[in-house]
Image (cartoon, rainbow, N blue to C red):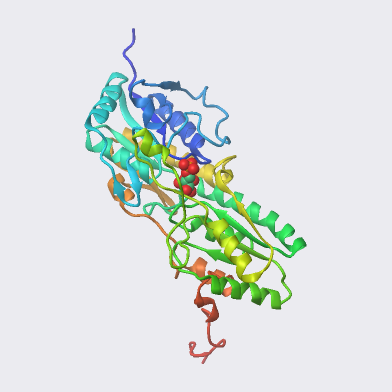
Amino acid sequence: MPPHKPSIGILTSGGDCPGLNAVIRAAVKSSERLGYDCVGFLRGYEGLVDPVSYMPLTARNTAGILTQGGTILGSTNKGRFSATVGENQRVDLDPSLLEAVATTVRQLSICGLICVGGDGSLTIAQQLHEHGIPVVGVPKTIDNDLGATAFTFGFDSAVACATDALDRLHTTAASHERIMVLEVMGRHAGWIALHAGIAGGGDVILLPEIPWSFEHVCRKIRERDSEGKKFTLVVVAEGAHLPGAGTVHRQDAKSEAAGYYQQVRLGGVGEIVTAELTRLLDREVRTVVLGHLQRGGNPTTFDRVLATQFGAHAVRLIHQGQFGQMVCYRPPNIESVPIAEAVRTLSRVDPGSSAVQAARALGISFGDATELASPFAGRCGDDGPSRG
Ligand code: F6P
């Protein structure tokens, strides 16, 4: 019998997103070319421990998955490996669980384990690394909230979905002269709301990063009314803070009863915004909660390219023995950073960023007072450079 080839393991953990299969395919194809076998663990980290569950991955059995949404390996964001409960709150995994993972890795001759996940899943990867397990991380999340990478794959696809929803809402809102409130995902970051709001012609964008008030939202709607624009599109990020209150959560008592930790589930702010606008304006207001549609479906071309590069680079890191690293996109290059560093820095929308400035310049309201003063206040040439 020929000796076993060293194997590269891969798992997808946390909420799914378009592009996971593209990472798997890229990792498998590039592993094979370097002489490794590949195994995929099922249902995220759960597949690493009793009952250990995995499938051999080959170029043949992963053919055709580049374009598919979801993950052929399955994923979960709860269970024994939940390592974050809130922002920057780490829960240490049980040492016996870490030891069980180490045993599986040894028994299957895994020389490197690719953990594909968001900040919570990468916090677990870091703990495996600290336990001596050879891991590399690949960031994924529709939320685009990891500071170490300019973009995560999944984000562009989610924005495309939310933009499509706004395009559709536009025509029906205009026909019925209604105010439509679209609640989008993103957790504590407003990236999806901001990008979809700009791309989909939103009139008001409410973000976790910019404090807002109903007074200013109503003012914008009345201003549009007076200009003869009888409808308004409001995009609200699920993590937007209600004025004078906090974020809106869904009740989820189940996880506590089951004895595992889970991050709070955001959601519901859209309904509250709708109820309050109806009361304040005495107008017809409707809510659409886009929810998991943003996570499903085929990845966009951008996400396919990014995910493919991430998968290939993760294999390269393993081949070079660079463990404890996470691949990242620093345009125009794919690079890597220590996972520990990557999970520490969450990325949020900068209220002074050029995207926000451009939106304000177009008259998009963020529900705050700033739109009253134009960011380009002053006439052309006032206080500007001398034209000699
Ligand atoms: O992190 C990705 C994400 O889709 C968030 O935008 C959202 O808040 C959360 O996951 C939803 O998680 P679940 O799949 O548990 O409903």
The answer to whether one can see residue 363 in this image is no
Q: Along the horizontal axis of the image, is 312 left or right of 127?
A: right
The answer to whether one can see residue 138 in this image is yes
Q: Residue furthest top?
A: 1
**x, y percent for residue 149:** 40, 51
Q: Along the horizontal axis of the image, is 312 left or right of 173?
A: left
Q: Is residue 252 above or below residue 87?
A: above
Choose between 105 and 48: the one closer to the eye. 48
Q: Is residue 383 above or below residue 268?
A: below
Quadrant housing the N terminus: top left
Q: Residue furthest bottom?
A: 388
- Residue under the image location 52 percent in, 64 percent down: 206
Res. 10 image quadrant: top left
- Residue under the image location 34 percent in, 34 percent down: 259
Q: Is residue 119 above or below residue 379?
A: above
- Residue under the image location 37 percent in, 40 percent down: 121
- Residue under the image location 53 percent in, 35 percent down: 70
Res. 147 image quadrant: bottom left
Q: Along the horizontal axis of the image, is 358 left or right of 260?
A: right
Q: Along the horizontal axis of the image, is 171 left or right of 368?
A: right
**x, y percent for residue 307:** 48, 41
